[in-house]
Amino acid sequence: MHTLAVYFREARAQVLATWRTPQFMIPSVILPLLFYGVMGLGLSKGREPVAHMMLANYVIFAAIAPAMFGFGAAVAAEREAKLVELKQIAPLPAGGYLAGRLAAALALVAVAIGLLGGLAYFGGVKMDAWRWAATLGLGLGSAVPFALIGLNLGLRMGSQGATALTNLLFLCFSLFGGLWIPLQAMPAWFGKVAQFTPSYHFGQLSQMLSGMQPVTDVERHVSILVAMSLAALIGAWAAWRRQAA
Amino acid sequence: MLPLSSEPPIAMLSKVLKRRGATLALNGLDLAIQPGQCVALLGPNGAGKSTSVALLTGRLRPEAGEAFLFGGDPRALAGRGRMGVMLQTAGLPNTLSVREQIDLFRGYYRKPRSLDEVVRLAGLEGLEKRRCGALSGGQQRRVQFALAIAGRPDFLVLDEPTTGMDIDARRALWSAVRSEIARGCAVLLTTHHLDEAEALADRIVVIDHGQVIADGTPEAIKARVSGVAIRCRTCLSDAELASLARVTGVSRDGGKVTLLTTSAPATLRELLARDETVDDLIVSGASLEDAVTRLVQAGQAAALQRQTEAA
């Protein structure tokens, strides 16, 4: 009971701290909304399938930035400010700090994806209710592996380095994952690079769930994503242990 | 040496060896803190104070030897739940208020103090709603102290607690620490201010080069250096001063020199004869600072001698 309450309080404090950092909040939430509003709805005026397909990509896009920055750059900055050290000494159960950070990142992703879904709905995208839930839910779920990847950077690098590299990865994931521009419109080698990004596999699954692509190859996409998540989890665990030692 | 207590120690380092980079930060250090004791850990920069604190709080692991907290691993949650720590440089989240941050830390402990009590003890009345990022350096130190005592700890670790504080704030913190000691809390204090150690500690442990070089009550430590200190301004060099009759130690602080001597009249006669420009002359009993400086110097001289002999 006590432990649960600690996790809950830690998460609440992290959410509150994130909420009060507008310079982080606003770009994370507004950027995907703005992009989708202009490119997804504005340019595709009247072509519902395009707006629909882009929504499937953008729910993943909206998860990447808050998850990776909230967990990459933010952890690096708090490490530098020696905030993490005190929490490792205080009787906070193992992982309480990280769980709190994850909760804060997920809350932010939920806000970003919720607003995105609302924008798409009022912009004219039509799906069955379960497809809405599945598409938005997948977007939220995709935040976990992205957060773990960000955590690897945040625990291993200084805050400036982590911010720079997170930015680079964020752009690569978005571009090579085909989240901004469909891969069909890009040179063929983009498709080869795409295979190595989690964003591509999430994008494909998202297309299937939202009904824009036939359901094929699910096992392959899912197993690649599971493998990537596990690798990120193990890497983060090792980095956390090492810096605690 | 203090008489051995029959109670098990609150915290203990036993023959601890720890390297930091290429240097041997702790070289077989032994330290045991008994319940209710306030121990001041003193020594020059790089002596191993911070490393000792890091081992006792579980942030580092010894390479050889053992570290115990309440008889267990310093990393165990049970031990950490009975300890409060104020680190030398620990950040506060800029965007949370003082009240929110204290509440968060209170929540980590099973039987925390009430928020009001913590705020009062740390002297933070009126600042509860302020964001931590908007506080002055001294106020932030007080919040860190509040976090350390929030769980009514049995063991309080204060690493340079009063850096960045003005005199009033320091005295207020001292009286807060004294009331923690009075209710039976053991304290480990590291500080560069010897007056702070003298004001709070009932036991002084001087370490240098990762080893304990003196351990005892402040009075016992002072008694280990021969009685009298002469402070003055002089144009004589350290070597010349050291050669004066009965001088056992020389140290400088800005333009002033402190000479430790076993006989003030004998030393003074020679000093005044050798240097007519002597000014600002004060003769007093040796302070704790004099004693610690002397002990460290003696330790270093002995180490140097061992090295030369070995070579």
Image (cartoon, coloured by chain):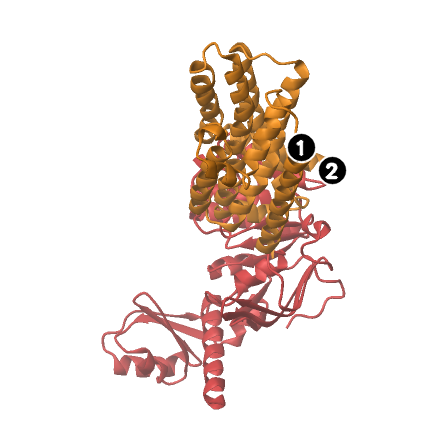
Chain colours: A orange, B red
Label 1 is found on which chain of the structure?
A: A
Viewer-proximal residue among B167 and A222: A222
User: Helix, strand, or loop for circle 1?
Assistant: helix
User: Helix, strand, or loop for circle 2?
Assistant: helix
Choose top left, top right, bottom left or bottom right for residue B107.
Answer: top right
**Residue A59 placed where, x, y %?**
55, 25
Viewer-proximal residue among B185 and B83: B83
The 10 Å Cα crowd at callout 1, few under 14, some 14 to 19, many 20 or more, is few
Q: Residue B194, can we see it?
A: yes
> Disc 2 marks which residue?
A2
Viewer-proximal residue among A114 and A178: A178
Q: Which numbered disc flags the more N-terminal residue, 1 or 2?
A: 2
Which is closer to the viewer, label 1 or label 2? 1
**Residue B168 placed where, x, y %?**
45, 45
> Disc 1 marks which residue?
A218
User: In the image, what residue type sits under mark 2?
Assistant: His
- The C terminus of chain A appears in which quarter of the rendering? bottom right
Choose top left, top right, bottom left or bottom right for residue B12.
Answer: bottom right
**Residue A237 placed where, x, y %?**
63, 49
User: In the image, what residue type sits under mark 1?
Assistant: Val
**Residue B135 placed where, x, y %?**
45, 37
Q: Is residue A59 left or right of residue B280?
A: right
Viewer-proximal residue among A144 and B272: A144
Which residue sits at x=72%, y=57%?
Answer: B70
